[in-house]
Image (tube, coloured by chain):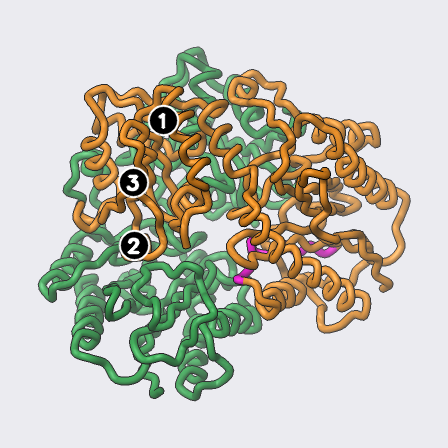
Chain colours: A green, B orange
């Protein structure tokens, strides 16, 4: 494993951070606080603090598993926390003291843990914390959003297995073969993707029978509920073929639909198709999302989540397809994101009504020089009961 | 689903927070920042902000999925974010403004996202953020650490299935049945636990063949590497039978051991047995951990992780069995934790050497009125090649 960021992109990151007056960018990934930037910028899989040391133009990784980092990570320095009493925070603070001056300007990304920030301030009281999502996070997100041809080739392996699975799921569900409950479908998909050559699941598959498809993200992810009951059901799964994950939702229409179900299904499919269409000529991503929200609201419904999100090393990667925020505090940290070649994201409109059920369809789209390219083949599947 | 905290415990939490001068405790659980306290205090599974409103002695939940919360959560108020433009942060800020005065004192737990803190301060500039892990986090941890008889009964269901799995894994591995690779073993365990009645895996099983057992947490969790190779191997798995997870590591000794392997295995087993012994009369948890560290260091090794951790609604629950910190910044936030009846935690010493391999054994222990009770039966398994 090596880092996914290219040399050119890393150089650009150093330049941008320097322009912002940042001496060191502090990035932390831990069990409670996942931050994919560690993996993207170094290749190290998880559980580490990373310093992008702008002044000295170097990266310093402070991993929980030093031996693992030596095997996998690409960084200018790797710190052994066992030489700092086994503590990742002490090791980070001591390293930081060596590389900054008396008035450090430390940049942080949006989702950093407050505990890290407090530890920095407690140990280096003259520190200025530079928090600026419109600059720092927007830059990191943009680097990750635009996939390199190599990253797209890895994603394509996941799409291929996903599409095979869509066919197989459709076949089994239509013929009532082997699958009785949500758990059965989940086990089938997660085992089968490995047999088809995947590394593993990109995330735990979500299976909702009609009894609970009104849940946006099913909890538990799959339960012992029967699949063959009238109404709306779905499976949301991701294939991680070679480090990069796909994300697909396949809706099932179990038996005949009533009027309200029909309206939900038609509205969601309209939003899906309009979004793909809109990607032909949109300038900014929020425009595509705003169009989707309007169509849903005109039909008398609400969509309780974004229209889509990037996929990559993690299932919820940058960019996000969401309407412009209206609330003051969010507006302050928000910035427009242009639609660009190399982006790979989901389009996943959904409507969820407690008394009727939920319907979501989700496909992955690659933005090529010729426009949007559908990478997956999710479609509504009609099941006779 | 309802909350796991008892009425008495919740009353105690309000009292303690009041004594600390906290008006509202702000707890957030999101995809990037898991905080089990939301689930513990309300029963709501995930993705929500929770206010423990001390002044008004009420709990207010701001969930991402409002319909799910109405079904599952126990809170005095549940806010519908769709009435706040679908934004969880705007909904939280507006709710906060309604319940606090002009100089709010907002308590935060250690692992809160810095983004939340910045949004609070930006929107309510006179806010005083009360961050005090020795009081706030220690109190929450203590509530969760001491399991009720009901919680222990749920854990016992997980132990039962885990112990059955240990027998079955031992049987299959010794007879070379069906399992060739790490992935095979992982799939076997995760499917089999569901067949034995579990809700699902408590976490993705970690399987390390001898080629990479030196990794503390294998990445990927299971790979296509062959299991039947000489050296040290292991599987680390958790069973979630009814919401609460077990956590067990089963080490395999594949073929004959060389001198260094023998020393590693003997040292780890000695530390394991000593720790159980020490739990008979220890006063504080760090004493047990410090004894383990001494034994390992006397043998010339290092242990790159804690001796153990609580288990419960999440696999890494409170308390943690770790030696006293020596670094200033960590000492400031640390507090002694007494060994108490009702605690349920792992004992999991391990040593990892790049050239030899890794060896970890992990069992779960329940602290009863009569002392420590071994709840699981992990033991070294010797495999002929």
- Label 3 marks a residue whose chain is B
How far apart marks 3 and 2 lie (CA) works out to 12 Å
Tell us which disc is closer to us: 3 or 1: 3
Tell us which disc is closer to us: 1 or 2: 2
Residue nearest the observer in this picture, A264 or B231: A264
* Residue A263: quarter of image: bottom left
- State which quarter of the image contains the C terminus of chain A: bottom left
Label of residue B107 in the image: 1
**Residue B160 visible in image:** yes
- Label 2 marks a residue whose chain is B
The vertical placement of A369 against A82, above or below, is below
**Which residue corresponds to the image point at 20% horizontal and 80% vertical from the top-left?**
A258
Q: Are marks 3 and 1 in contact (CB under 8 Å)?
A: no
The numbered mark, 3 or 2, whose residue comes first in the sequence reads: 3
Residue nearest the observer in this picture, B291 or B223: B291
- Secondary structure predominantly adopted by residues drawn in magenta: strand
Magenta span contains residue B39? no
Q: Residues within 10 Å of mark 2 (few under 14, many from 20)?
A: some
**Residue A74 visible in image:** no
Q: Are marks 1 and 2 on the same chain?
A: yes
Give the labeled residue for mark 3.
B60
Magenta-drawn segment = B199-209
The vertical placement of A236 against B362, above or below, is below
Residue B210: % across, % down: 75, 54
Q: Residues within 10 Å of mark 1 (few under 14, many from 20)?
A: many
Q: Left or right: where does residue B38 sit relative to residue B77? A: right
Give the labeled residue for mark 2.
B70
Residue B319: % across, % down: 58, 35
Q: Are marks 3 and 1 on the same chain?
A: yes
């Amino acid at each position: 494993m090596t880092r996914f960021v290219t040399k050119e992109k890393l150089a650009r990151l150093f330049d941008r951070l320097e322009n912002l007056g940042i001496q060191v960018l502090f990035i932390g990934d831990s069990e409670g606080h996942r931050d994919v930037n560690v993996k993207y910028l170094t290749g190290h899989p998880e559980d580490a603090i990373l310093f992008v040391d702008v002044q000295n133009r170097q990266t310093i990784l402070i991993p929980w598993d030093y031996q693992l980092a030596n095997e996998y990570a690409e960084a200018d320095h790797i710190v052994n926390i066992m030489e700092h009493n086994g503590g990742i925070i002490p090791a980070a603070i001591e390293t930081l003291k060596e590389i900054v001056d008396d008035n450090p300007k430390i940049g942080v990304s949006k989702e950093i843990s407050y505990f890290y920030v407090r530890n920095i301030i407690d140990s280096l009281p003259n520190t200025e914390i530079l928090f600026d999502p419109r600059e720092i996070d927007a830059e990191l997100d943009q680097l990750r959003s635009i996939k390199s041809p190599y990253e797209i080739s890895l994603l394509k392996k996941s799409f291929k297995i996903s599409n095979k699975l869509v066919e197989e799921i459709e076949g089994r569900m239509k013929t009532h073969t082997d699958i009785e409950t949500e758990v059965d479908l989940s086990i089938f998909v997660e085992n089968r993707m490995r047999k088809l050559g995947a590394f593993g699941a990109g995330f735990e598959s979500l299976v909702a029978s009609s009894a609970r498809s009104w849940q946006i993200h099913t909890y538990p992810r799959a339960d012992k509920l029967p699949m063959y009951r009238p109404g709306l059901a779905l499976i949301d799964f991701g294939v991680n073929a070679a480090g990069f994950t796909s994300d697909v939702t396949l809706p099932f229409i179990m038996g005949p639909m009533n009027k309200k179900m029909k309206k939900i299904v038609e509205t969601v499919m309209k939003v899906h198709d309009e979004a793909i269409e809109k990607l032909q000529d949109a300038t900014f991503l929020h425009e595509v999302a705003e169009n989707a929200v309007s169509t849903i609201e005109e039909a008398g419904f609400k969509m309780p989540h974004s229209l889509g999100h990037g996929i990559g090393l993690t299932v919820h990667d940058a960019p996000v397809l969401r309407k412009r925020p209206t609330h003051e505090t969010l507006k302050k940290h928000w910035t427009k994101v242009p639609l660009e070649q190399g982006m790979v994201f989901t389009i996943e409109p959904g409507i969820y009504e407690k008394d009727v059920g939920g319907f979501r369809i989700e496909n992955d789209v690659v933005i090529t020089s010729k426009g949007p390219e559908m990478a997956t083949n999710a479609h509504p599947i009609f099941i006779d009961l």
